[in-house]
Amino acid sequence: MKINVEVGEFGPCEPARVGNVYPIKGGRGLRYGHMQVLIAITEPREQWQGPAALMLVITKEGKPVGVNSYGMHYVDDLQPIAFVEGLEEMTLTMRSL
């Protein structure tokens, strides 16, 4: 898997959506220029637990190197830096071995 990085502009206050790309905020990922791609937004599981953002961590060359998850309340306050097209329509099929 490889993601081609082609950066455009986003306006302020864009709602979080699958495909948004966010910079890593700290640690080794920040030093190396890693980014996070929002690959899914989960449904709330319990009364006390809201939806979560599932993120794929990629290098600046577009290679996956990790995953993170955050509450949507945190992601809603972030400003996206790019968008990955096609993730909303992506459908995978699982078959028995």
Image (cartoon, rainbow, N blue to C red):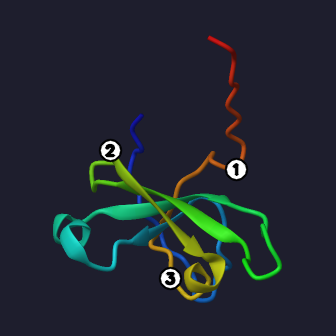
Residue type at the position of mark 1: Glu
Q: Residue 88 carries which label?
A: 1
Q: Pointers 1 and 2 in contact (CB under 8 A)?
A: no
In the picture of the structure, the residue carrying the numbered disc 2 is 63
Instruction: Identify the secondary structure beneath mark 3.
Output: loop
**Side (left or right) of 66 relative to 17:** left
- Residue 3 occupies quadrant: top left
Q: Which residue is drawn at 34% across and 72% down?
A: 24
Residue 51 spot, x, y in % from top left: 72, 72
Q: Distance between the residues labelled 3 and 2?
A: 22 Å
Q: Distance between the residues labelled 1 and 2?
A: 19 Å
Residue 60 spot, x, y in % from top left: 28, 56
Q: Disc 1 or 2, which lies upstream in sequence? A: 2
Q: Residue furthest top?
A: 97
Q: Disc 3 or 2, which lies upstream in sequence? A: 2
**Considering only vertical position in the picture, is 44 above or below 89?**
below
Instruction: Identify the secondary structure beneath mark 2.
Output: loop
**Side (left or right) of 30 relative to 72:** left
In the picture of the structure, the residue carrying the numbered disc 3 is 79
Instruction: Identify the secondary structure beneath mark 1.
Output: loop
- Residue 63 occupies quadrant: top left
**Considering only vertical position in the picture, is 5 above or below 77?**
above
* Quadrant in which the C terminus is drawn: top right
